[in-house]
Image: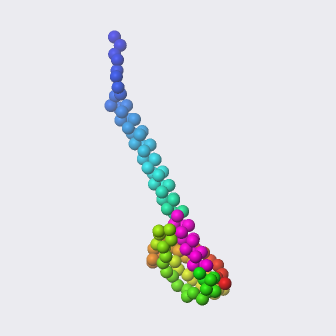
Amino acid sequence: MISSRNGFSLLETLVALTIVAIGLTAGVRAASLSTESAWRVRAGTCALWTARNRMAERRAMEGALPVDGGETVMGGMRLYWRETVSPDGSVTVEVFDKPEGGHTLASLRGDPR
């Protein structure tokens, strides 16, 4: 007599659930990396705009601005910048994510004249 079997065994169900769980974990990880990458691109773009704006302000004031640092909000992000002047007169603007000079998001060097 032939036995008929309906449905899946417990082992088959567990294997299928394991495969689905591994797939979902990989998908969540990929989405997380994508979100982090998008944040880094956004932060880098805003930081570069901040550095360029500061350099443009220097050019507009013909270099008369004091060399220092400050903070600004660009694209909803609070960014901190610091300027240094080289002996040759060129200015370097560095933009950070923290006030004490955390991670450098952008650095721009140029002649403000």
What type of secondary structure mainly makes up the magenta span? helix
Towards the viewer: 7 or 50: 50
Towards the viewer: 8 or 57: 57
| Residue at left offset 55%, top offset 81% | 83
| Residue at left offset 51%, top offset 82% | 69
Question: How did the renderer colour the structure?
Answer: rainbow
Is residue 92 visible in the rendered image? The answer is no
| Residue at left offset 40%, top offset 35% | 16
Any magenta on residue 22? no
| Residue at left offset 56%, top offset 67% | 45
Where does the image place residue 97, in percent across and percent down from the top left?
48, 71
Up-down relation of residue 25 to residue 46 (above or below)? above
Towards the viewer: 2 or 7: 7
Q: In this view, does 6 lie to the left or right of 109?
A: left
Any magenta on residue 49? yes
Where does the image place residue 60, in percent across and percent down from the top left?
62, 83
Where, quadrant-wise, is the N terminus in this rendering? Answer: top left
Q: Is residue 113 left or right of residue 28?
A: right
The residue stretch that appears in magenta: 42-56
Up-down relation of residue 18 to residue 2 (above or below)? below
Is residue 21 visible in the rendered image? The answer is yes
Figure quadrant of residue 46: bottom right
Figure quadrant of residue 86: bottom right
Where does the image place residue 76, in percent across and percent down from the top left?
47, 68
